[in-house]
Amino acid sequence: MKKLKLFDKLIYLINALVATLLLLAYTLPLLPPKQFAVLSVLSLSVPFLIMVNVCFFTYWLVKVKKQMLLSLLVLTIGYFSFGALYKFSSSGKTQFSKNTLSVMNYNVRLFNLYDWIKEKDIEDSITRFIKRKSPDVLCLQEYHPHKDIDLSFYSHKYEKLSGKNVKYGQAIFSKYPIVNSGSVEFPETSNNAIFADIVKGSDTIRVYNVHLQSLRIDTNVEKLKKEDSERLLKRVGQTFKMQQFQTELFLLHKKQCRHKMIISGDFNNTAYSYIYKKIKGDLKDSFEEDGNGFGRTYNFKFFPVRIDFILADASFEIESFKTFDEEFSDHYPIMSYLKLH
């Protein structure tokens, strides 16, 4: 440190602060939001903190300075604890056996009912996209039975809707018979988790579609700048508390299931959170197994955010996973091919 110039000393101090914040963030999956609500907010910034630490590491590497070891150490700890932020593992597989089940997850944002996206006929674009990809199972969040939406090419569906003037909620569509279905109700919200038991061959598979409490963060840069930071932190902290309670209700229901299981949904939280850790348990994360790139699923302009997931138990082999770039919602659709053993 003594041999560094004044500018580099300042850079290293900032580096140390960011590295410390990232190291602190690594502990958040162990801390219940009910006890550490404000601190839990830091989990949302983990992708950003990782990218900044990569920049610091590169800076010191180019200058051939031992200060690069600080960010390298913190990044290495994160890699072995959570896996890589950026994945190179995609198999690119396009041919699948008959024993493979394809699952798509998509928060469709009411099919653009209120014209958030100025492009016309978004609902038609979404329908054409789904039909083109033709997943065996389709899990939709913020689903609305739009008059122009025709998903009748699916023989079976289960939906759970709420709302007085505008009906919306979650839905599961399937090419295979649904023999049982239901909803895990979350109090004082329109969010919930629904499930459908799908029969494929001799297997009965429980598919959950989970939509946890929304963070309600406006992605518009100018609006975000105007928002009071203290109020924003408090609101997000309260949302994380609600998410923990909703997760506890869901896990009680999940514990009673004896079928092979797939959990799909919009968790409104990242893979670095307490919520994700609890729901995932010993399940496989499709992105971690066969994803590519950052795997961002939410259109947040500042850094890549992955809050939508397809998880499967050990009885499945993850053959393929893809995040699509279609901008028909504030979320991006994801799809995985799961091979049954």
Image (spheres, rainbow, N blue to C red):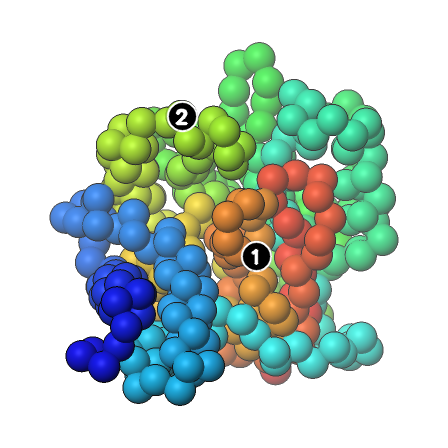
Using the image as rendered, state which of residue 218 and residue 297 is in the foreground: 218
Name the residue rendered at 33%, 75% in the picture: 71
Q: Amino acid at mark 2?
A: Lys
Where is residue 141, by image quadrant? Answer: top right
Q: Position of residue 95 (x, y in %)?
A: 82, 78
Total marks in image: 2
The N terminus appears in which quarter of the rendering? bottom left
Q: Left or right of 334: which side holds 241? A: left
| Label 1: which secondary element | loop
Query: Residue beneath label 1, please?
Result: 296
Q: Amino acid at mark 1?
A: Arg
Using the image as rendered, state which of residue 260 and residue 339 is in the foreground: 339
Name the residue rendered at 21%, 44% in the picture: 38
The C terminus appears in which quarter of the rendering? bottom right
Q: Left or right of 55: which side holds 135? A: right
Q: Is residue 146 above or below residue 34?
A: above
Name the residue rendered at 30%, 33% in the picture: 229
Tell me if label 1 and label 2 are in contact, CB under 8 Å.
no
Front: mark 1 or 2: 2
Using the image as rendered, state which of residue 236 and residue 219 is in the foreground: 219
Which label was assigned to residue 185? none
Q: CA distance from mark 1 to mark 2?
A: 25 Å
| Chain-order first, disc 1 or disc 2 | 2
Name the residue rendered at 20%, 58% in the picture: 31
Q: Position of residue 45 (x, y in %)?
A: 37, 54
Query: Residue beneath label 2, please?
Result: 226
Q: Is residue 264 above or below residue 15?
A: above
**Residue sitting farthest toward the top:** 165
